[in-house]
Amino acid sequence: MNLTKAKIISNEQISLRYYHMKIAIPDWSVSEVQAGQFFHIRTTDDFSPLLRRPFSIYRINELDNTLEFLYLVKGAGTKRLAERKPNELLDIFGPLGNTFTIPEMSRGLMLVARGVGIATLSALAFAAGKKGVPCFAILSARTKEDILVEKELNEVGIKTFLVNDLDSTSDLANVKVMAEELINSKQVDSIYTCGSKRLSILMKDMAEKHQLFAEIALEENMGCAMGACYACVCDIKEGNEIQTIRICQDGPVLPLKKVVLS
């Protein structure tokens, strides 16, 4: 992991609530970064807000040695980050956390993301594309305008299925039908999810029912991102015991079957 300065290449609003940021890190290779990992970023040059914010990696560009992030502008930290301009330097710490696993000889991956959860899963989708592994993505959001990176995923051969709250297509019953069709047609044998507890519970049940490999990327506010503050804990089940782990140290990617979601 590195504590360093990154140069902001671009930082643009892409919808009403979401921004897309691209950075370059001088004298450092992005080939060290893997899908599923995150960076802990100081959003300003002063101390307001004091704490860094964790941002999952949306895209790793080895050709031009840049990284990309998608983020929801919600609190004080992301509001300040949205004000940052190209050529400014950004204080970053990372890469942190573990990575997604693509099983050997996988027939295909199914990604199920809610809102900005696709920011985390997109890096996995792009990695699968490089390996020649088929990938399908169910993208859920409040409105059609909140659905992210459909075009970018389609451009690299990933088939997307779009659902949203306004037209009621995002209800669990409909998503379940979509997922069942992909599984029963033998197009996927691995499930990955991020961004919604309801969808994660559904995917956990489906993975258990069909005996599929499944992982979840957890999102949590973090104080230190180094395991010292215990601000980002969650429960997992090991055998018959419930254990508490730190997402920054033991995650953010975890076996879906182990995570206690209820």
Image: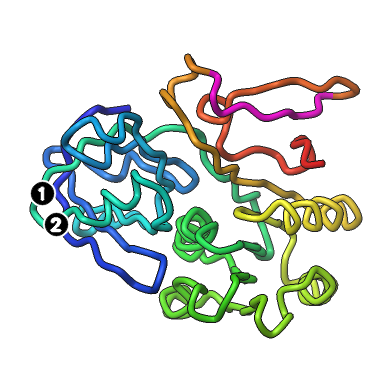
Residue located at (35% from left, 45% from top): 76
Q: Residue furthest left?
A: 87
Say which amino acid is labelled 1. Answer: Glu
- Left or right: residue 105 versus residue 184 is left
In the image, what residue type sits under mark 2? Lys
Q: Position of residue 179 (x, y in %)?
A: 77, 70
Give the vertical position of 231 relative to 114 (above or below). above
Q: Is residue 132 left or right of residue 225?
A: right
At x 80%, y 51%, the residue is 204
Q: Nearer the viewer, residue 210 or 227?
A: 227
Helix, strand or loop under label 2: loop
Residue 56 at what x, y percent from top left? 43, 47
Q: What's the mark number on residue 88? A: 1
Residue 163 lies, with reference to residue 111, above or below; the image says below
Above or below 134: residue 53: above
User: Do residues under tags 1 and 2 come within 8 Å of each other at their CB atoms?
Assistant: yes
